[in-house]
Amino acid sequence: MAGSGAVGSGAVGSGAVAPGAGDDARRAQAARALLVAAHREHWGTVLAAVARTVGGPLGGDLGIAEEATQDAFVQALEAWPRDGAPERPAAWLTTVARRRALDRVRRDAVLRRRLPLLAVEADRAAHAPHGPGGADGSGGAYGSGGAAGAADDGVPDERLALVLACCHPALAPEGRVALTLRMVCGLSTAEVARAFLVSEPTMAARLTRAKRKVAAAGVPLRVPPPPELAARLPTVLDVVHLAATAGHTASTGDALRRDDLAARALDLARVLAVLVPRDPEVLGLLALLVLTEARAPARTDAQGVPVPLEQQDRALWDAGLTAEGLRHLGTARRALGRRRPGRHLLQAEVAAVHARAASYAATDWQRLLLLHDALCATWPSPVVRLARAAAVGLARGPEQGLAALDAVAGDERLRSYPYLPAARGEMLRRLGRREEAAAELRRALALQPSAAERRGLERRLAALGAPEAPRRDGGPGGSGVSGGGER
């Protein structure tokens, strides 16, 4: 097997985790931990490098690159605990995956070349002299050199090229997001299916169609020239933002947030900021995600119940990340110049208002409302309009907030969105209309939010002195996609 040859090549075999005095279990545990980290950090990089390095033979077939990358991680799962983890995990994985991919390409080429011959000369095939161990047309031991033998002094960061391929205009929007989550973020098909609230076979079929479209369209795995990149960058930012939103509030599972997905989205935003360093929207998105990440430790209590912003312990907010996010925001403003800000930068401004407030009471609600007004003008999605209505309540009082919420309540797209009755319940509570507030919270619970959000709503209901709504377990969570200005 090509893979076993790669492991045995010695190029990546020296162990960062030195063999202890018989402490194999400890070494194996360390190797597995490193592999988990490598999967989170390098999946997209390895896959992109494999697809691009052997791009000619692969002909843009992301499926082959994906399978080869999976094989490399599986091989690492066996080899690292046994032999010790490599010093450069990404290079090790890339080497193995490249060889796997080229092996597959070679087999396919042989089949394509021989199958027509077999069809024509079927009666002579049984006596053909070239058996399975014969020629491949490219010489024998490709595994010892060839394209895969390219120096692995470092694995170039090619994730942007992969993201751009996954976000190609030839794909439907939902296909772009799904393909990015699978190919770049490394989520399993089942995980992507859960994020979209569809069955795993449905998502598998959707991903297969998307990959075939990428191959059929001959999408090159490269960063396009600046004019084309500028045209496609908004789609990429949308995809990263959607991934971050899905991580911020998980639609399924017991936890409020998907740490892995949030981390991968933030990682992608950082990569984009390095590769496109002077785009205000790129920097705005990075600022937004960093500032959001800074608040993560305070979003739930020890039992995993969501803590409203008003009650969060701001001492738990990560000061380092807050400072970093504000720094990115400043850079984005300078890059913007005299132009109008886009939605990502505006959302970062909203997050910055919260980050700068010493307390909930000290929040600059008037500025927050102005920012939501600007956000609605730029991105008038139903969820953003809902967030703006909530901001009205904070800036001008609950009565006006309730009226603003009622003004957006007729949008059919919000009919099954639990945040709408939850927001109405909050305004009614502040107006002292407790029974009506409790009824709204029960409506929110009836819309089947995620398990964590359910616990938060139940706590709010209990604080009103109202009995909990009957449980309706077993269904999927609510939308879970915030997309609003306040994250």
Image (tube, rainbow, N blue to C red):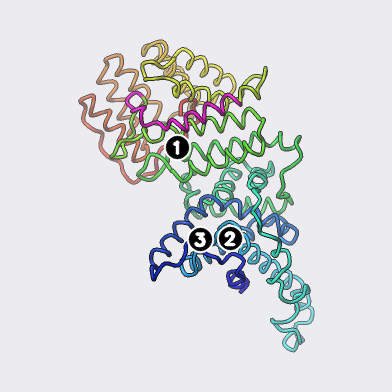
Q: Which range of residues does the magenta coloring cover?
A: 310-331
Count neighbours of disc 2 (C-alpha within 10 A) and say few if under 14, some if 14 to 19, many if 20 or more.
Answer: many
User: To which residue does mark 3 refer?
Assistant: 16
Give the main secondary structure, helix, strand or loop, of the magenta stretch. helix
Q: Are marks 1 and 2 in contact (CB under 8 Å)?
A: no
Q: Nearer the viewer, mark 3 or mark 1?
A: 3
Question: In the rendered image, which quarter is residue 381 located in?
Answer: top right
Front residue of 348 and 434: 348
Q: Amino acid at mark 1?
A: His
Q: Estimate the spatial distance between the alpha carbons at disc 3 and disc 2, rounded to whole Å.
A: 15 Å
Location of the N terminus by quadrant is bottom right
Q: Secondary structure at mark 1?
A: helix
As helix, strand or loop, the secondary structure at mark 3 comes to loop
> Mark 1 — residue?
248
Going 69% across and 60% down the picture, which residue do you hit?
A: 151
The residue that appears at 55% across and 20% down in the rendered structure is 376
Of circles 1 and 2, the one toward us is 2
Q: Quadrant of residue 228?
A: top right
Q: Give the CA distance from mark 3 to mark 1.
A: 34 Å
- In this view, the residue in front, 277 or 469, is 277
Q: Considering only vertical position in the picture, is 309 above or below 392?
A: below
Q: Is residue 87 left or right of residue 468?
A: right
Q: Position of residue 63 (x, y in %)?
A: 63, 58
Circle 3/circle 2 CB separation < 8 Å: no
Q: Is residue 116 above or below residue 61?
A: below
Gap in angstroms between the C-alphas marked 1 and 2: 30 Å
Extreme residue toward the front, this view: 21
Of the numbered discs in the image, which one, if any, rests on residue 93?
A: 2
Of mark 3 and mark 1, the one earlier in the sequence is 3
| Sequence-earlier tag: 1 or 2 | 2
Q: Give how far across and how far down residue 70 sits, in percent.
A: 56, 61
* Label pair 3/1, CB-CB below 8 angstroms: no
